[in-house]
């Protein structure tokens, strides 16, 4: 669980014992690698290099983290089982790799964290006291895909049931998953094959007590979440998709009442709407969060127009996730279109939009914005450090994981990747006669061929490092602008980045 292999282009992987060549375009330091069976092995202008990339570092301390994740009415919650060093008395556990937003706390066996979807890393460090100058650091990672189990079962069940208006029950159904073919040609479709039209009828709603509203209308929106290939030839393209079903009800649901929803695919789900905790797909909040002093803190409600929208301005509450108490009560403001019918850059959704202004909330904490008779947004943070700093840290770590010439491993990251394209591992870069101007006129399928064909015996020293591009091993001179931006941050905020 604590090691994860970074995905790479299968025909450009830095595998020990294979031969590679690298060439540089004149005035444009674009590096490319190809294997020895690319058809150019007999070309005298294509020198070969035997390379053995440095292995990724491994964590060898006592500490360990075991991660699991579960769904809650308001979002995802990760449980971190902690194994601390024997002499540790304090620990920091969180998703911040720099530990600037995580407090020291007494050692405990378990920590619970809010988490986003996708691959989530958790960092921890331990010390035996405030004077401990060498705390032990450990990292673990986990794919957060709360819909996977439901999507790949024989009878896929809804991954979300929530209200978008008092009389619109919104249901998300995801069917199938693509298992990415990192170690073989082609990806694998896991789960049942379902025709989307099977979801257009057959939904049933029942109440545990009393009569449930009738379903007056059914609308479906289907969109792909990703793309993948199944089959040995890689030509059969499959799309993991999310089907969003809007069920128009004859009357509003009763808050706090238990209902049963039966899917046309055969599964039955029990749910209860609590408008102070249940997730609503219609309430949207900035997941970066806000600093306490930010003057414009707003969430938004997007409701169906016409009879299913709100006849009066919705009332909303800002709820503290720590104790479920309301810290702010407000009334939504309808966003009206201008004379040309547009809001901002255009009303693209056809929905009614309401602004939920909670700028008065300045106390640090984690909150969710909840609309009466509907439900809540994902939780968000109001904090001086963990909001915009969190975004900056995420970007910096994205750049870190795309760095060429360094090994990735614990305890800095749970990604396990050997050091690629480093001169100490035998990399030699040769000058190419192909110019950047000529390269600009070539398509991708012709560029590498011409780059190698123009290789010379002239060695280019220092042409390594930089950042990879689009998940493969290429580096481009255009990427240097990011280095300039990062150095600019150091220049304007030297204390922060010391």
Image: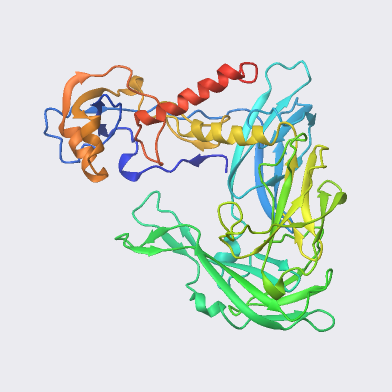
Q: Is residue 109 above or below residue 175?
A: above
Q: Residue 184 appears at what percent x and percent y? A: 36, 52
Side of 173 relative to 455 (left or right): right
Q: Is residue 253 above or below residue 174?
A: below
Q: Residue 160 appears at what percent x and percent y? A: 66, 64
Q: Residue 340 sits in which quadrant?
A: bottom right
Q: Residue 432 sits in which quadrant?
A: top left
Q: Nearer the viewer, residue 290 or 405?
A: 290
Side of 82 relative to 489 (left or right): right
Name the residue at 67% across, 69% down.
305
Q: Residue 457 sits in which quadrant?
A: top left
* Count of picture labels: 0
Q: Nearer the viewer, residue 365 or 168?
A: 168
Looking at this view, name the residue that lies furthest to the front. 339
Name the residue at 71% across, 29% down.
85
Q: Is residue 168 above or below residue 434?
A: below
Position of the C terminus, as image quadrant, is top right
Q: Nearer the viewer, residue 98 or 179?
A: 98
Name the residue at 11% across, 28% down.
44
Q: Residue 171 appears at what percent x and percent y? A: 64, 69
Can residue 186 be seen in the rendering of this structure?
Answer: yes
Q: Nearer the viewer, residue 120 or 154?
A: 120
Name the residue at 56% across, 79% down.
200
Position of the N terminus, as image quadrant, is top right
């Amino acid at each position: 669980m604590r090691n994860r292999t970074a995905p790479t282009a299968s025909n450009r992987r830095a595998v020990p014992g294979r031969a590679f060549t690298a060439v540089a375009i004149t005035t444009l330091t674009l590096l490319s690698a190809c294997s020895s069976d690319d058809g150019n092995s007999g070309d005298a202008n294509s020198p070969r290099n035997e390379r053995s990339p440095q292995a990724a570092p491994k964590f060898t301390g006592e500490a360990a983290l075991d991660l699991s994740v579960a769904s809650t009415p308001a979002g995802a919650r990760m449980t971190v089982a902690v194994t601390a060093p024997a002499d540790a008395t304090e620990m920091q556990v969180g998703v911040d790799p720099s530990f600037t937003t995580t407090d020291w706390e007494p050692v405990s066996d378990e920590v619970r964290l809010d988490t986003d979807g996708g691959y989530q890393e958790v960092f921890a460090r331990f010390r035996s006291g405030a004077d401990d100058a060498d705390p032990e650091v450990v990292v673990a990672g986990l794919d957060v895909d709360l819909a996977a189990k439901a999507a790949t079962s024989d009878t896929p069940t809804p991954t979300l049931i929530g209200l978008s208006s008092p009389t619109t029950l919104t249901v998300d159904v995801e069917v199938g998953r693509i298992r990415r073919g990192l170690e073989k040609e082609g990806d694998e479709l896991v789960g049942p094959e379902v025709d989307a039209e099977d979801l257009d009828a057959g939904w049933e709603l029942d109440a545990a007590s009393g009569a449930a509203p009738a379903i007056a209308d059914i609308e479906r929106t289907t969109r792909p979440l990703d793309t993948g290939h199944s089959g040995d030839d890689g030509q059969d393209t499959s799309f993991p998709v999310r089907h969003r079903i809007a069920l128009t009800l004859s009357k509003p649901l009763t808050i706090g009442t238990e209902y049963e929803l039966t899917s046309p695919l055969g599964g039955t789900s029990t749910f209860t709407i609590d408008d102070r905790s249940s997730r609503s797909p219609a309430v949207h909040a900035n997941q970066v969060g806000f600093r306490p002093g930010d003057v414009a803190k707003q969430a938004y409600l997007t409701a169906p127009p016409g009879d299913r929208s709100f006849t009066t301005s919705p009332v909303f509450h800002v709820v503290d996730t720590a104790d479920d108490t309301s810290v702010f009560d407000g009334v939504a403001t309808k966003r009206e279109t201008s004379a040309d019918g547009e809001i901002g850059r255009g009303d693209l959704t056809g929905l009614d939009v309401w602004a939920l202004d909670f700028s008065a909330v300045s106390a640090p904490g984690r909150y969710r914005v909840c609309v009466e008779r509907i439900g809540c947004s994902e939780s968000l943070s109001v904090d001086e450090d963990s909001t915009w700093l969190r975004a900056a840290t995420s970007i910096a770590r994205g750049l870190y994981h795309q760095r060429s010439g360094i090994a990735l491993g614990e305890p800095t990251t749970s990604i396990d990747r050997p050091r690629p394209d480093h001169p100490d591992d035998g990399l030699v870069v040769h000058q190419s006669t192909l110019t950047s101007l000529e390269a600009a006129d070539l398509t991708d399928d012709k560029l590498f061929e011409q780059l190698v064909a123009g290789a010379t015996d002239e060695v280019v020293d220092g042409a390594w490092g930089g950042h990879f591009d689009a998940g493969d091993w290429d580096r481009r001179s255009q990427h240097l602008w990011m280095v300039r931006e990062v150095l600019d941050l150091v220049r304007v905020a030297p204390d922060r980045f010391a």
